[in-house]
Amino acid sequence: MAQLTLLGARCVAAVTGLKLLLAPAYRSTDFEVHRNWLAVASQTPIQRWYEEDTSEWTLDYPPTFAWFEWLLAQAARAVDPAMLKVEANHSPSPATVLFQRISVIASDAVLIFGLLFATRKCGVKHQLVALLLVLLNPGLLLVDHIHFQYNGMLLGLLVWSLALMAEGQDLAGAIVFTVLVTMKHLFACLGPLYAVYLLRHYCRGDRAVSKFMLLAASVSAVVAASFGPFIVHGQLKQVLWRLFPFGRGLLHAFWAPNFWALYAALDQFLRALLPRLGLVLPHAASSITGGLVGSSSFSVLPNITPAMTLISVFLGMTPCLIQTWRQPAPGAFPFAAVHACLTSFLLGFHVHEKAILMATVPLGWLAASSYMTFEDAYVPSENADRDLHTAAVGAGPVRRQLLRSASEMQDETSAGRGSGKDHESTTSASAGLSRKAEAWHQSATVDTGTSRGEASQLMEYCVLSTAGHYALLPLIFTLQEYPIKVLLLLVSTIGIGALTGDDDAQQQAGRRQASKTVAIAKLYLLGFAVVEGYCAVLHFLIFGEQLPFVPLMLRSVYSAMGVTAVWIRWTTRFFHQSSSKTKHV
């Protein structure tokens, strides 16, 4: 334990030092956004928080985050009272800049403690890798510690909630998730998954009704504590209006690397092609390349409405929801949550490119802390009358839980519980579970390297991380930060790729398909060097200042190809799981 504490402390200290070095770097308008929220939360009465519009950067996060800003403002007052002025144009002092930068670093403690909780039953190596993969996530460093946001704190709550759910602590996990949604409503995309899982896994048995009432009361209490004061002051409608503004387009100013980026690129291709074929464009003009937040219209393809994207997201989540309903395995829940986040990112309306962190950060934890492949997260129950909790995240938890479940069933059998068919079923399940647990227990002390199933899925994580985070690079557009952002992404890609194992092992008999998948992924990753070479150098040598949106579009489209490919593979796995003929809980 001392070694683990020392290694973890060294990792956290090193990453914290890196974040401090980034403090003087470029900061986006989000810096002033949060500075203004500090002022609004501390200088105006609560009934004015969601009405105050002196600055264009109005408060548009849920109330719990507003309370977080109020808490920060109490400390900010002692550092520089001038930062709490409500004004349209504010010039931050060095003290203000340092305070806000440090506030982001300090709030990352939620992420650090969430990771330590989630990996506390794993080995030293796995916990250290989880800390490195998540804390050195290039997207998180770019968005939070250069661009400026508080995603680390929010994603820490997500990891904490998923870890609680994976361990069977459903009520606590649901409460933490509710707190998260009342801090940033974009995480509500996980609501259907949590609802399905909790209904099937928590609200069951003889106490199903009382458990449901306890769950409802707990969630309602969190929501009431967050929104209650605004409801009392008659501000609920105004709060909801700020949280869900209308009039925005399908695509953000910088295209997120999702399905709609590919859709928009196809529209642009057809727009250029059809006139050459003598065909008339269905629409006179397109507004998808103008960099405007509130406008998205296509020249050839049909325009996409928010309702259409909502239906698309729900359909995209269907395999995951069906599998969760049929087999609510605790250890599989974090995988399902990552799939749900990725589906929302891929098919949602007006998605910000920064939303990819909702998938890559928890997936970094899963990639580091689990010996299991995706399929191993589902261990079919052999007794439909008992929830054995036979899956959990992390090699240590999985094996220990299997052994514990087998032991419990053996005790139940020896105690004479059950008779006839029930007794035979219990004995059979116990024997089968014991054999599997013992086999995994024997392998627990042997480091046999990375299996090919794990290697291909680690490579999927590498592709998703590289593709999703590469699309974030245009957010940091200043020349002096260019080497930093490229180096962070490059080191991350190489580091994750190294976890997939050596190439010689991939050539073993019976593993050619996994080897082929990894080879294609590596070829795709090498393509980023070509894309960046064109976008950063060749385009401006050829076209100068003309066609400024082409490099942005090319980065988004190439990244979207990788994100979409990973989503398809994950969705296919959930579809195969949900259509299997195994007996479910």
Image: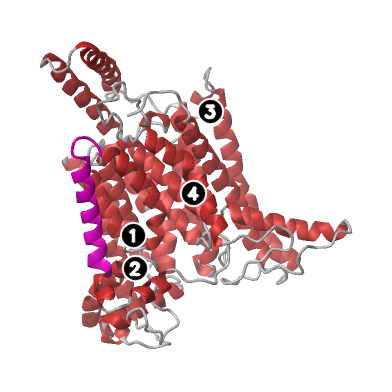
Classify the position of the C terminus by image quarter: top left
Q: Nearer the viewer, mark 3 or mark 1?
A: 1
Which region shows up in magenta? 204-227
How far apart, in angstroms, are the residues tagged by discs 1 and 2? 8 Å
Q: Amino acid at mark 2?
A: Pro
Classify the position of the N terminus by image quarter: top left
User: Is 2 drawn above or below residue 547 in the view shown?
Assistant: above
How far apart, in angstroms, are the residues tagged by discs 3 and 1? 38 Å
323 and 142: which is toward the camera: 323
User: In terms of sequence position, does the residue under pointer 1 or pointer 2 come before the other?
Assistant: 2
Mark 4 touches mark 3? (CB < 8 Å):
no
Q: Residue furthest right?
A: 278
Q: In the image, residue 182 lies at what x, y percent?
A: 31, 63
Queried whether the magenta region covers residue 187, the answer comes back as no
User: In terms of sequence position, does the residue under pointer 4 or pointer 3 come before the other?
Assistant: 4
Mark 1 touches mark 4? (CB < 8 Å):
no
Q: Label 4: how many residues lie within 10 Å, few (<14), some (14-19) or many (20+)?
A: some
Q: In the image, residue 394 lies at what x, y percent?
A: 30, 35
Q: Tell me the element at label 4.
A: helix
Task: Determine which quarter of the picture holds residue 39.
Answer: bottom left
The numbered disc on residue 314 is 4
User: Is 572 drawn above or below residue 158 in the view shown?
Assistant: above
Q: Label 3: how many residues lie within 10 Å, few (<14), some (14-19) or many (20+)?
A: some
Q: Main secondary structure of the magenta part?
A: helix
Task: Determine which quarter of the picture holds residue 78.
Answer: bottom left
Disc 2: which residue: 62
The numbered disc on residue 514 is 3
The numbered disc on residue 181 is 1
